[in-house]
Amino acid sequence: MKFTRLMLTAAFAALPFAAPAADLTLDPSLGDVAVRQFTVCDTDPGTLAPACPRPGTIDNTFSFTVAFTTPGIENAGFGTSITPAAGGEFTTIEWTLLDPTMAEVAHGTGSGLNTQLPHDLAVGPGGDYTYVIHYVLSSTLLSSAGFTMVITTGPTTGEVPEPATLALLALGLMAAGVGARRRRL
């Protein structure tokens, strides 16, 4: 009985307990793009969004995480939408990007593409990055309001080939040289 209990304890201790998965996973080497849509408010009782204040203000901060699977670069921007157009406005949209150590590495304000500073931020594997978004919506007579965040990625510029890639290239050149020499003989 003691041996069985010991084996079960050892087996349980060996199980991997991973950290919670990121909300998004992007591969910069493939140029992955993520589009996140957020409904700030609407008048549809069938949605989870709060009702738009008439008049009033919504001031909110939230976050989500992204895992970058390969080294690369990242940019982000926002687009906003309100209906009716004269029914209100986003008076504040700002965000920060935190690296896996929770240090701020980028930030942006307002809407538009590539409003992030710095541009072409180097990102990579080894932990989740966190986007913290803060917005203030001022409403006089809104039916709905929302925004879209676009995150674009790409491979790191000036990448150096891995040693294995260089070794394969060297073998190919040697084989071509041997073949050419045999044809001459």
Image (tube, rainbow, N blue to C red):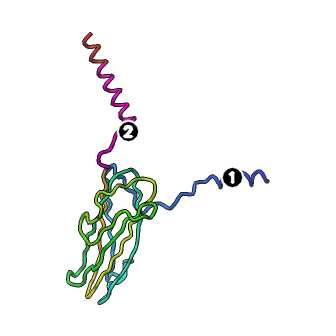
Instruction: Tell me if I can see residue 62 in this picture.
Output: yes
Q: Amino acid at mark 1?
A: Ala
Residue 178: x %, y % from top left? 31, 18
Residue 140, compared with residue 64, is above or below; it is below
Q: Which mark is residue 75?
A: none
Q: Position of residue 34 (x, y in %)?
A: 32, 60
Does label 1 or label 2 sit earlier along the sequence?
A: 1
Residue 160 in magenta stretch: yes
* Residue furthest to the top: 185
> In the displayed structure, would residue 100 be above or below residue 53?
above
Residue type (three-letter) at the residue carrying disc 2: Glu
Quadrant containing the C terminus in the rendered view: top left
Which label was assigned to residue 162? Answer: 2
Name the side, left or right, on which 73 lies relative to 127: left
At x 50%, y 62%, the residue is 20
The residue indicated by pointer 1 is 10
- What residue is at 39 percent from the left and 36 percent from the top? 163
Any part of residue 45 in sight: no
Residue 170 vs 38, above or below: the answer is above
Q: Nearer the viewer, residue 61 or 54?
A: 61
Quadrant position of residue 147? bottom left
- Figure quadrant of residue 80: bottom left
Residue 86 pos. (x, y %): 20, 83
Q: Residue at x 22, y 82 (%)?
A: 84
- Magenta stretch bounds: 155-177
Q: CA distance from mark 1 to mark 2?
A: 39 Å
Residue at 32 percent of width and 84 percent of height: 52
